[in-house]
Amino acid sequence: MLSRATPNIPTHHIRRSWRALFDDEGDAARLAELWNSPSPLSRTLGEPVALHPRAAGSVPLYCRPGTTDAQVFDDTFVGLYHLPPIGLARDAVILDLGANVGYTAAHYAAMLPEARIVCVEMDEQNAALARRNLAAFGARCVVIRAAAWDVDGEVAYGGEEEWGFRVGALDGVEVRAAGRKVAPALTVETIMHRAGVSAIDFAKIDVEGAEASIVRPDSAWLRRVRSIKVEHHPPATGETMTRALVGAGFEVRRDEKHPRGVVGVRADERA
């Protein structure tokens, strides 16, 4: 188990970018230890460790040893791949599809103090940690445990890393016997209905290939979105996501920050 005291990590192993995230350098050292904890294939999980990034208002955000949480934390607060392509109002409505453990949602909530963030995460353990990480923001952050999909129902999924679970075939008992997991599946229209939102100011989508099923030119929900950022994974491609967003009325460009990112903004929303 990782110590909550400052770990004995050589200073040259603590990245300068990590030091810049925190008021307490002990948090940077703890992130370095988490980064170097055993790989997911050989881990013995310890208790989640609290980190306090200034960009999330210094609220405690928990990170599990021996998982990909440290990499997600770095992608979020150093990479900043999730930032909206346009300026958003303080009370914006944000849809976070593929919320993982809630780090991006925490950043949105801190940046926009009256915003409402609807988080959707397929994996039960990831979703549970997301709820813990977002508790400080109260009812503004809602976590729905589900896979965003093209029909309501159930999907099987699997994977060896917490940041890369993917939907698999719907084989029922056969998939479960193979060690796969099962999650509720919801269309984006159903997700919006359950969350009580009718329009989205910004949608962030990172769903490990499921974007091919939910981002299509005929997806009605896209017409209620002002701006969008999609990280595409096979079978989705940059070309298919671009065609879908153009077909839904967006002006589209490649994401300047992420090689697999596509950004869409409505013409009347350009910054």
Image (cartoon, helix red, strand yellow):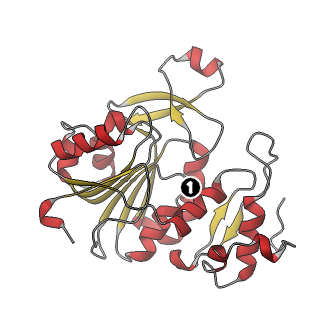
Nearer to the camera, 45 or 264: 264
Instruction: Farthest residue to the top: give it.
Output: 174
Residue at image coords 75%, 78%: 26
Work out which quarter of the rendered image holds the C terminus and state it: bottom left
Relative image position of residue 27 (x, y in whole percent): 71, 75
Tell me the kind of residue under disc 1: Val
Residue at image coords 42%, 68%: 108
Residue at image coords 87%, 73%: 8
Relative image position of residue 237 (x, y in whole percent): 37, 38
Report which quarter residue 24 is drawn in. Answer: bottom right
Instruction: Farthest residue to the left: give it.
Output: 268
Could you tell me which secondary element the residue under label 1 belongs to?
A: loop
Is residue 134 something one can see in this rendering?
no
Q: Specify few, some or many for label 1: CA neighbours under 10 Å numbering under 14, 14-19, or 20 or more.
A: many
Q: Is residue 157 left or right of residue 196?
A: right
Relative image position of residue 59 (x, y in whole percent): 58, 75
Relative to 109, is 215 above or below? above
Relative to 5, is 63 above or below? above
Nearer to the camera, 10 or 107: 10
Instruction: Farthest residue to the bottom: give it.
Output: 23
Relative to 215, is 71 above or below? below
Residue at image coords 42%, 48%: 260
Is residue 152 something one can see in this rendering?
yes
* Tally of marks: 1
Report which quarter residue 95 is drawn in. Answer: bottom left
Name the residue that disc number 1 marks: 101
Work out which quarter of the rendered image holds the N terminus and state it: bottom right
Nearer to the camera, 6 or 229: 229
